Amino acid sequence: MIRFQRRTALIAAALVTALPIHAFAANTIKVGIIAEMTGAFADFGQQMTTGAKAYMKEHGDTVAGKKIELIIKDVGGPAPDVSKRLAQELVVKDNVDFIAGFGLTPNALAVAPITTEAKKPTIIMNAATSIITTKSPYLTRVSMTLPQVTAPLGDWAFKNGIRKVYIAVADYGPGYDAEGAFKKSFTAAGGQIVDAVRMPLTNPDYGPFVQRIKDTKPDAVFVFVPAGESAVGFMKAYAERGLAAAGIKLIATGDMTDDGVIDALGNSAVGVITTHHYSAAHESPENKAFLAAYAAIDATHRPNFMAVGGYDAMAMIYSVVKQLNGNVDPDKAMALIKGMKIASPRGPIEIDAETRDVTQNVYVREVKRVNGKLYNVEFFTTPSVKDPGKEAK
Ligand code: PHB
């Protein structure tokens, strides 16, 4: 009996030494995604995760011999405490190599300390308050910042005869960023802000706000509300209260007319001018490939800028894993991310080496009917815009 045990132990030891080293390294790269999959902001999670899956469908799920695995966690809505707990779980239980996702700013900000402590490269797929990427050296962003997409609109508005603007924004980080950036570029051009209001993020009733705007009689109202249900709600109030008929133009960031809901906005959206980084109508081979890859997974919804964020985050991860030959070291990963260039469906993007934030073209667009469907048709480009939110510091 003893002899048998000794023999077994010897055989086991021989087997262990015979196994190649890499057999002990995990053969999967795990990407933990924290996203709003349910509730009023469920569109955000659906768009980001479908965009990520579209990239994997198009490029295969194996990189440098490692299988790429998504672990999707539902944060349910604006819930920083839940987001933090989910990030902890992804680090401790799932031992992920990357964290990604985040439609909403508060959910992204909540994970910054964990990102730093655990040294997890963390890629923001949407959340767009400027300050987010300053909160950890392991944070980067492939989406946009509100100051970045807003600033060109202030210039455009003044050049196009708008002189008096009422500002209406959602009452949280991205809203304050949009308000500040619009005020800065529009007044620098010579325009005047007649009033500004902050509206609730959750369960907003836009009617009374829109009525007050109408009574103030500005040339235009500049709006930032989160994409999806909030944008549909604001547009409905704008139409119902007759602002367009009263000569008050609606100008906004592209969150107002995002591709996920634009067709549901109906005729009241036609002619609305917005600035943003992505339109499904963008003409490029990269966008064509993206639209086809997305449709192969979900043929019933049109992808929006958040889907592009999911897709480009995976492009970033694939590039890092490939260059590190499948051995993801967090500091080496961040070094590769700094300065990385991606041929995105929106146009070329680059990760600023100093701020880890995205540099990209910002387009002025007009809502038009194309082949019977509403689209944001790009007509003016400000190239290679860095986040102006970082400059002030
Ligand atoms: C954000 O919370 O940062 C956010 C959410 C929705 C948007 C843009 C920004 O459309």
Image (cartoon, rainbow, N blue to C red):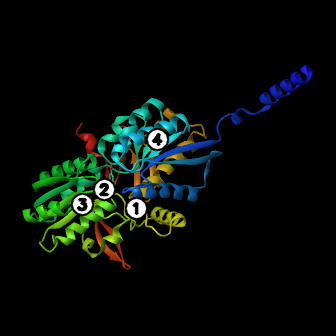
Seen in the image, is 60 located left or right of residue 269? right
Which residue is disc 3 drawn over? 252
Q: How many numbered circles does the render carry?
A: 4
- Judged from this view, the residue extending furthest toward the top is 2
Which residue is pictured at 43% across the width and 67% down the height? 302
Q: Which mark is residue 226?
A: 2
Location of residue 247 (image quadrant): bottom left
Amino acid type at circle 4 is: Leu
Question: x, y (%) of residue 118?
Answer: 48, 31
Amino acid type at circle 3 is: Ala
Seen in the image, is 95 located left or right of residue 74? right
Amino acid type at circle 1 is: Asn
Which residue is pictured at 43% across the width and 36% down the height? 138
Location of residue 328 (image quadrant): top right
- Kindly state the secondary structure of the residue where label 4 is placed: helix
Which residue is disc 1 drawn over? 304
Which residue is pictured at 41% across the width and 57% down the height? 42
Location of residue 301 (image quadrant): bottom left
Closer to us: 52 or 343:
52
Q: Earlier in the sequence, mark 2 or mark 1?
A: 2
Other residues around mark 2 within 10 Å, as few (<14) / some (14–19) / many (≥20):
many
Check the picture and name the quadrant holding the N terminus: top right
Can residue 344 be seen in the rendering of this structure? no
Q: Earlier in the sequence, mark 4 or mark 1?
A: 4
Mark 1 vs mark 3, CA separation in Å: 16 Å
Answer yes or no: do the residues labelled 4 and 2 have beta carbons within 8 Å? no
- Kindly state the secondary structure of the residue where label 1 is placed: loop
- Kindly state the secondary structure of the residue where label 3 is placed: strand
